[in-house]
């Protein structure tokens, strides 16, 4: 059996989305994968905890809820950034102390789904690094920092992070650069760990927005990360990989009725296309659109 440690962080509002991520991981695991889930608990209700635990029916695994003291994150709570970045997003900055018994773990944002076993990703060699991740979709940030990764999927080498006291580095950098923080935890991680992050293949975090805006046009990504504001669970979502989310939702206690499923997939897709045409009527004039068409439908 291969032990694979996985971490998610959420409050009660995001616990159902975390459950969908977990369901996708369990569904696509190898028979030999021994999955250990650590959920950083930002006041998840007992009802939702029981529903998450029921996902063990998909594949036997270990699920542990790690209670987090919000007082530990008072210095991060005052950061003014995007509204969708909540306090649980900063929990990953203290993973090495929140889960002291673990030396290596894959961290997932709750707006992700997994389509393959995580064995290969988890076994990424991080001996000389603090973590491993996929380059971010933001080209401007990559010009400033060629190893600027997206923080939605990261393999943390917690053993190395403890050796280098990285938690203290995160906090000190935050205090000294408070007014410069624009993208929350991701900026903090990339600035502090610059040069100490290993880059892995794009398939392990395809950052998906609409048909044109995707970090990679790979046809069968191992991991899809819904990075746009219009997540699949929002009505009229532009996400190209929207239906994957509902595929895994149907394996959870929150699955939709057949009627609601059609409403959220077929009807939603039609309306989202109409709205997209209305907002960007000249989208077909952009070279990037034709690149997406070629990569998606023509290229073998």
Image: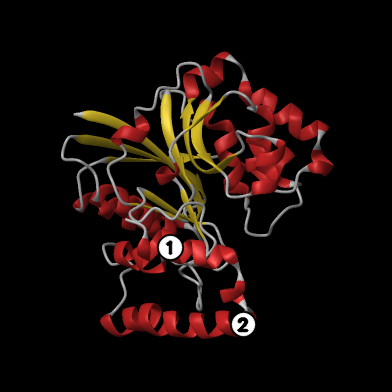
The vertical placement of 179 against 23, above or below, is above
Residue 3 picture location, percent across and down: 27, 29
With 98 as the anchor, is 72 left or right in this view? right
Q: Earlier in the sequence, mark 2 or mark 1?
A: 2
Nearest the camera: 125 or 41? 125
Q: Nearer the viewer, mark 2 or mark 1?
A: 1
Q: Could you tell me if the residues under marks 2 and 1 are in contact, i.e. CB atoms within 8 Å?
A: no
Mark-to-mark CA distance, 2 and 1: 20 Å
Q: Quadrant of the C terminus?
A: bottom left
Counting from the top left corner in percent of width and height, residue 149 is at 57, 39
Whether residue 266 is visible to the viewer of this picture, yes or no, is: yes
Instruction: Indicate the quadrant where residue 65 lies.
Output: top left
Picture quarter with the N terminus = top left
193 is higher (above) or lower (below) than 91? above
Which residue is identified by label 1? 294
Q: Residues within 10 Å of mark 2 (few under 14, many from 20)?
A: few
Position of 147 relative to 127 (above/below) = below
Nearer the observer, 117 or 257: 117
Q: How many marks?
A: 2
Residue at x 54%, y 40% (from the top left corner):
68
Does residue 45 appear anywhere in the picture?
no
Q: Is residue 196 above or below residue 33?
A: above
Q: Secondary structure at mark 2?
A: loop
Q: Residue at x 20, y 47 (%)?
A: 59
The image quadrant of residue 36 is top left
Q: Secondary structure at mark 1?
A: helix
- In the drawing, what numbered circle is on residue 281? 2
Give the percent coordinates (x, y) of residue 176: 82, 31
What residue do we see at 62% from left, 18% from top? Answer: 165
Question: Neighbour class for label 1 at 10 Å: few (<14), some, many (≥20)?
Answer: few
Q: Going by the image, does 104 lie left or right of 90?
A: left
């Amino acid at each position: 059996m291969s032990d694979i440690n996985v971490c998610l962080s959420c409050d009660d509002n995001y616990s159902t989305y975390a459950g969908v991520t977990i369901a996708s991981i369990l569904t696509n695991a190898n028979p030999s994968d021994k999955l250990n889930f650590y959920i950083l608990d930002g006041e998840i209700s007992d009802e939702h905890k029981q529903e998450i635990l029921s996902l063990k029916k998909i594949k036997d695994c270990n699920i542990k809820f790690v209670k987090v003291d919000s007082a530990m994150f008072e210095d991060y709570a005052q950061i003014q950034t995007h509204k969708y970045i909540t306090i649980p997003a900063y929990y990953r900055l203290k993973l090495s102390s929140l889960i002291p018994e673990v030396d290596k773990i894959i961290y997932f944002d709750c707006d992700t789904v997994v389509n393959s076993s995580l064995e290969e990703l988890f076994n990424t060699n991080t001996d000389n690094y603090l973590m491993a991740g996929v380059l971010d979709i933001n080209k401007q940030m990559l010009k400033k920092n060629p190893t600027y990764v997206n923080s939605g999927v990261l393999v943390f080498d917690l053993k190395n992070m403890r050796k280098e006291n990285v938690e203290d580095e995160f906090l000190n950098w935050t205090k000294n650069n408070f007014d410069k923080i624009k993208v929350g935890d991701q900026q903090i991680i990339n600035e502090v760990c610059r040069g100490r992050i290993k880059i892995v293949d794009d398939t392990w975090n395809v950052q998906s927005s609409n048909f044109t805006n995707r970090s990679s046009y790979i046809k069968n990504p191992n991991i899809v990360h819904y990075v746009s504001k219009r997540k699949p669970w929002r009505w009229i979502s532009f996400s190209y990989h929207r239906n994957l989310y509902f595929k895994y939702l149907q394996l959870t206690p929150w699955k939709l009725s057949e009627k609601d499923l059609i409403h959220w997939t077929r009807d939603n897709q039609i309306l989202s296309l109409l709205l997209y045409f209305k907002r960007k009527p000249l989208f077909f004039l952009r070279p990037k659109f034709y690149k997406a068409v070629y990569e998606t439908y023509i290229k073998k």
